[in-house]
Amino acid sequence: MLCSLGLSLQYGCYPDGAQYIDEFDITYTTFDEQYDFSGNSTYARPDRIVIDVEIDRFGDTTYIYMKDRFAQPLLAGIDENMQNYGWSKVDIEDNPDLLLMPAGISSTTYFYSWWYDWWYCPWYPGWGWYWPPYYQVSSVTTGSFIMALSDPNDGQESPINRSGISWLSVNNGILTGANDVTRALNGIDQSFIQSPYLKIN
Amino acid sequence: MKKILFIALMATLGPFASNQTIAQSQIALSYSVGFPVGDLAKFITAASWRGVTFDYHAMVNQHVGFGFSTGWNVFYEEIGLDTYTYENQTLTGRQYRFSNHLPILFSAGYYFKPNSTLDPFFTLGIGTIYTERRTEIGIFQIEQDAWNFALVPEVGVLYDINGITIVSMSLQYYNGFQAGNELDAAQNYLAFKLGFQL
């Protein structure tokens, strides 16, 4: 009995680990080691950030976007970091070297690549990209913020007309638990800080 | 607060101890503070303030006893925001490191002065320590475990305060030899134990 009491007290004192939501924040980045970023200088991105998709019973899809008051500061943060690294933002019709694809995750539905296939379709007919197999979709929790860079020209070298990801950033959970975008902006900054290979200037 | 409650409980239970039982067996419940050594110290530098041990010796004569020893020590450390790179992947976040140690030992003890106010003793435990090492970062966690063969010497002293309450103080070295593939090094720690003979 005394032994049980001792163990109960010990269990009661067990350390908690992370307790506050920002203590769970992580910034993950990875890149294609074969890809030469220095040979490029321009990128294009959408003006909105997709966060979900609704699919009706006929299979039609309706995309849902992040509210502008949250999305615009995040897009500005991305542009600032890209420009600090020497990149120039151009319109998508100006044949950018890379496409930068941001997304917020508000559900576990896998919608991310569908939306970009649709968004870039008029400019790169038949082109698409695929989610990197080394990063499990299930690891991306609700509230995560994703950025990906993909080279649309790579799709021409692919037998399935699909480009891989040259750079991927996943900030887990930074869009949850707050009514401001400070954590998300910090996560965006950190993504670039830990990706010095993106610097071309 | 929890530490205070623990000490208060020990103080409450102490008076139930008696010399009559000591003659036939030595039973101790102790608070154990652990200090990491070797590979464990590389993983967690902080001392473990969360530990409890239970020791039992059936006495074959006044000096010699055989029995078992078990317990639980938790080492824990928060590593601040840091960046880790592996090949083409980089992760930034806060790390929370845990190392749990559960020894299960057969034990032999020798008590030098069984009827004195101060009774020095030496014990040697042989058995296993179950080690569970866990690293949490964000929603991810890495868990490694091992059943380490263990050799655990201990030196200490029993202090008979008033003929009723006997305090036990000792130093015990938990030497868990390398075992398995997940943890590829020995898992060792030194424990300072303060307890009561029951």
Image (spheres, helix red, strand yellow):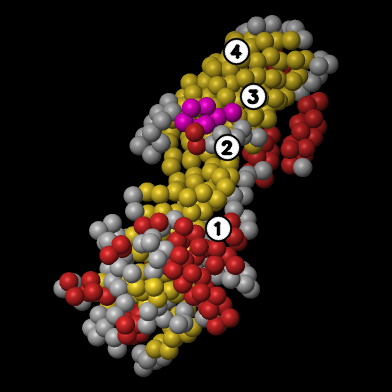
Secondary structure beneath label 1: helix
Q: Amino acid at mark 1?
A: Phe
| Residue lying at 69% horizontally and 20% vertically, measured from the top left | B169
Q: How far is the residue under mark 2 from the one under mark 4?
A: 26 Å
Residue underneath mark 3: B192
Q: Find the magenta span and give its range.
A: B35-41
Asked if disc 3 and disc 2 are in contact, CB closer than 8 Å, the reply is no
Query: Measured along the vertical axis of the image, is residue B148 above or below residue A14?
Result: above
Asked if disc 3 and disc 1 are in contact, CB closer than 8 Å, the reply is no
- Pick the residue in front: B22 or A166: A166
State the image coordinates of residue B16 (x, y, percent, origin top left).
79, 26
- Pick the residue in front: A61 or B193: A61
- Which quarter of the image is occupied by the N terminus of chain A? top right
Host chain of mark 2: B
Q: Which mark is residue B75?
A: 2
Location of residue A182 (image quadrant): bottom right
Host chain of mark 1: A
